[in-house]
Amino acid sequence: MKTSQPGPRAARSTAATQASAQPSPPSAAPPSDAVVRARAEALIARMTPEEKAGQITQYFDFLTAQDEAKRVSTEVAAGRAGSLLFVADPVEINRLQRIAVEQTRLGIPLLFGYDLIHGFRTILPVPLAMAASWDPDLVERAQAVAAAEARAVGLHWAFAPMVDIARDPRWGRMIEGAGEDPYLGAAMAAAQVRGFQGPYLGSPDRVIAGPKHFAGYGAALGGRDYDEVNLSDNELWNVYLPPFKAAVDAGAGNIMTAYMGLNGVPATGNHWLLTDVLRKAWGFAGFVVTDAGAAASLQTHGVARDLADAGVKALSAGVDMEMAPPFGEAAFKTLPGALAAGRITTPQLDDAVRRVLEAKIRLGLFEQPYVDVARASEVLADPAHRAVARQAAERSAVLLRNEGALLPLDPHALRRIAVLGPLADAARETVGPWVFQQDDSETVTVLAGIRARLGDAVRIDTTPGVSIPARQFSSIFEGPEHARAPRIAVDDDAEIERAVNYARGADVAIVVLGEAQIMIGENASRSSLDLPGRQQQLLDAVLATATPTVVLLMSARPLDLRGSAPQALMTIWYPGSQGGAAVAGLLFGDVAPGGKLPFNWPRNIGQLPLPYARLNSHQPSSAEQRYWNEPNTPLYAFGYGLSYSSFSYAKLHIDRQKITPAERMSVSVELTNTGRRVADEVAQLYIHQRYGASARPVRELKGFQRVTLAPGETRTLRFTLGPEHLRYWTASARAFVHDDSVFDVFVGGDSSASLSASFEVCKA
Ligand code: NOJ
């Protein structure tokens, strides 16, 4: 994979660059659907079956793999590639584009795609963290930054957002999504699509969004990545599909299929998913790409006889473009043969080609296939982008404990602090997985952030304390990225002792613990939620000193600290390239934490899965004591997060006691900042349907607002509930229904909110 470091950093004035961090206004009206279609059809009329099959084939381009790179150039020159992924160097992008435009018979430009998960050069907090901000506007601005940087180097398409619901934190890809809830997931999905794409597909400085992995991928058996998924229609329609539907409704131009089998049928060969649901029920008009090698692997799943059969099955299910296996043969190469044999039809092939060509036309690639290399380095150096990344990290952190109001720390009251832990000064870990173009020397680690914030006035003693043993796993991402990764290796015994001594002599110990970034992400599941290596031992030893201790967790799954109770505990996720600066601001009270958990945090791994939106069942009175040995409540509830201030909710009011299913109603509540500082609160609204055709969850999120209140300020917040919030899919009707029922409404600062009211829905 390419590890380009384009050009020197040229600073631009903040005023001039802030626009690129904002959703940009349309500079030109997009062409009409009819014009786009006619242009695509005119091209298709001139294409051979081989050119058509090439147009819907995407190849990996690893510049590190010379043979592969040569093969890619050959395929492009022969008109047998419509798209490439992983090239990220603007010079190389222009070189390949020139081959496509100037040397092929039809001169159709290439579409360049990339895993733009949480930033390109400016690294944002990981997506799960951004979901914890409960701030869709911020998330939209953040992904607009990623889009601007990617587009500046010549990329056109993000393989993002990942909108898979994750209810099992053993699954490492939980880091890429928005957590366990369909409503929050849908809000984050739509915000990210808007951020990537802007007001319309083809907006300047934006890219195509490709929500993935359609669908159900997060429910892998045992949390083991790629393993089979068995989901009832009820869970699919009510939990796993809504974020995809929201992304489609927000105008996503692309959808990526999933690797695994859904109820026995691989998602990539699943006609029901790709055609009946996506195309017919939802009217998706963009193009569908397979996950890498997922068409060919229909053979591995045991549903395709050979590669040709795999190509036919994927296309027939509803795939438009194949992301070919990184080092294997493309299944879509066989399509001309399948056409000749009558196994697919010309209209079928043309539909797929048309959708891909339409994307290229909408993006303006025929008019402007090349990228301005000089401008690229300017955009990548934009300080406004760093400001957005920092704000995203600040707003994502979730404060879980703060005994005795240890936080925020008063810098003037400190003489000496200890900054400990293997992740305190680990630049590569701080940005998390799924980044390839970051500049590690630019990343602000927690230690660097604290140093910069405190200056020389406070003495800082620091040691990693322990190492994190990280097994290298075999993946396509091995190579340059991991070669750059710093090895976190120290002599544990000596360093634990040193850490304890530092803690003993300090006014406060700040311990940064968690998981190495390689332990989370694709193909990185864990069968334990413990702190890896000897970090628990380090933590317990530091806590035994009785020095006030702040633990910062760098991870993207709930970890089990085995009952250890530091005075303060904050999850900072993998906070991105400005992470350390953001964390320092939070520790010393420049900003107050306001993030909330996007998942239920279990007490231990044995409780999994533990969604907050569970159904009532037999003997609800004992629902919290189903295990002999411990409660089955979470350690921290979905939606939970503390502040440096405090809030109270009062006067919950529903404007109508009875509505018909078609009507809307307004819910209001008074929120007061009862503390002594300006702070944010995320007000959350949950409903519960008491009875109906199906049992409904005890709580379901149906509204939220992140607001900033001054000390003593009271604000009236209004929420609307309408048909889209009250309907659900039921197996008894095989459709979405509205039941006549009584609904409870709960409003508060997390999913255990107690302030409630009720109303009735009645058809007559
Ligand atoms: C496989 C991953 O599942 C997918 O999310 C990613 O976009 C592709 N590889 C390309 O890297």
Image: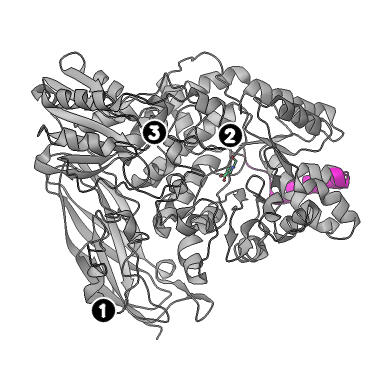
Q: Left of 204 or right of it: where is 419?
A: left
Q: Left of 22 or right of it: where is 405?
A: left
Q: Main secondary structure of the magenta part?
A: helix
Bounds of the magenta span? Answer: 29-50
Q: Please, which colouring scheme is shown?
A: one colour
Of residues 14 and 448, the one nearer the viewer is: 448
Q: Can see residue 432?
A: yes
Q: Residues within 10 Å of mark 1 (few under 14, many from 20)?
A: few
Q: Which residue is mark 3?
A: 469
Residue 155: horizontal and vertical position, in percent?
62, 32
* Residue furthest front in the image: 493
Q: Is residue 119 above or below residue 373?
A: below
Residue 58: horizontal and vertical position, in percent?
71, 40
Q: Is residue 627 above or below residue 574?
A: below
Q: Secondary structure at mark 2?
A: loop
| Label drawn at residue 619 | 1
| Label drawn at residue 139 | none
Q: Residues within 10 Å of mark 3 (few under 14, many from 20)?
A: some
